[in-house]
Amino acid sequence: MFCETRSERTVEVYNKFRKLNAKKDAEPSASVVPKNALSVAKERQGTCCICNDINLTLVNLSKKCTHEAGCCVPCHSQTISNGITGKGIHRFECPMPTCNVEFEPSEYYHLLDTRLTDLVDKLLLNKYLESSEEFRWCKSTKGCGAGQLVENYRDLLGYYTCHACDQQLCFRHSFEWHKGYTCDEFDQERAQNPDLASDATVLAFTKQCPNQACRTPIMKFEGCDVMACCRYGTHACSDSKGKCDHGGKNYCGQRFCWKCLGKIDVDKKAGSYVRHCNQNCEYATLNH
């Protein structure tokens, strides 16, 4: 979650976001295709490209899709809902293999309930805040995940203090403050000292597994913020459907949120994630 301070600047940014993303109440329609897509997107009967069931009503969600509809509404809805609640994502592409169209949120909102549309709004707000030069997420290795607008960043000596965990953080480098060095000195020393450069990389991209019995350092360079303590990587571990050995005794398989180190359990019956994110984390709204 973003920093909920009552500063004028925070309110200004939030209100600007709300104006840009204000949604008009959708008018009732007999069609499951968004009203603004009716001129291009078409419904047809056929076999769904995801569930492979036959004689279903297939739809295109986006007016940018120029191919025949290939996915049924329940599969569209389930894929998007799982992405929002499980991975905290709001960007979705057309499932057809030959199409790379990305859906606008307004094109899939009608498939979601109020809770999920509110979650998407908050995820979009976080992304909008990230576009502000003065906004920073706390990247403390202790696991905090809070965000805030650093209004006086131009006047800083180089660091600011996280409002949630009191960790000193470097504004320029977006990780814990490099005590003993100014930012310019740190950059110069890092360029000349391979060991320091390596340490800085580890500090920026590595966190310890939150399982107290494990604490294995995990490095992340890309992908979503659902991580697994697994030698083979989060994606390969997830694809194994619970059969992965995680690479030996040094890895425990615990899933966790990269932002705040909150544990993520798997509801095997529902096939979904159960988050335990820090209350300050941007994904805290996904907690069950």
Image: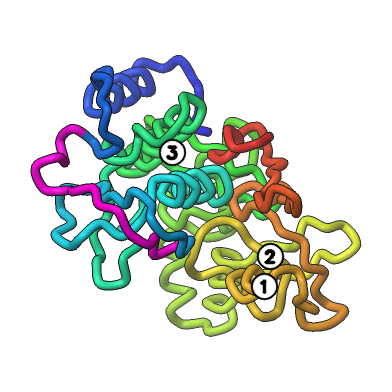
Task: Specify few, some or many for label 1: CA neighbours under 10 Å numbering under 14, 14-19, or 20 or more.
Answer: many
Residue 226, image quadrant: bottom right
Distance, label 2 to label 1, CA atoms, is 7 Å
For disc 3, the marked residue is 123
| Residue 49 covered by magenta stretch | yes
Q: In this view, does 31 lie to the left or right of 10?
A: left
Check contact, mark 2 vs mark 3: CB within 8 A: no
Give the x, y percent position of residue 19.
Answer: 23, 21
Q: Residue 283: which disc?
A: none
Dot in front, 1 or 3: 1
Q: What stretch of residues is rendered in magenta? A: 35-50
For disc 2, the marked residue is 228
Check contact, mark 2 vs mark 1: CB within 8 A: yes
Instruction: Kindly identify the amino acid type of the residue bearing the numbered disc 1.
Output: Cys
Q: Is mark 2 on a helix, strand or loop?
A: strand
Taking the spot 30% from the left edge, 53% from the top edge, the residue there is 45
Q: Is residue 245 left or right of residue 163?
A: right
Give the x, y percent position of residue 180.
Answer: 58, 58
Residue 166, image quadrant: top right
Task: Specify few, some or many for label 3: CA neighbours under 10 Å numbering under 14, 14-19, or 20 or more.
Answer: many
| Residue 136 covered by magenta stretch | no
Q: Which colour scheme is used?
A: rainbow
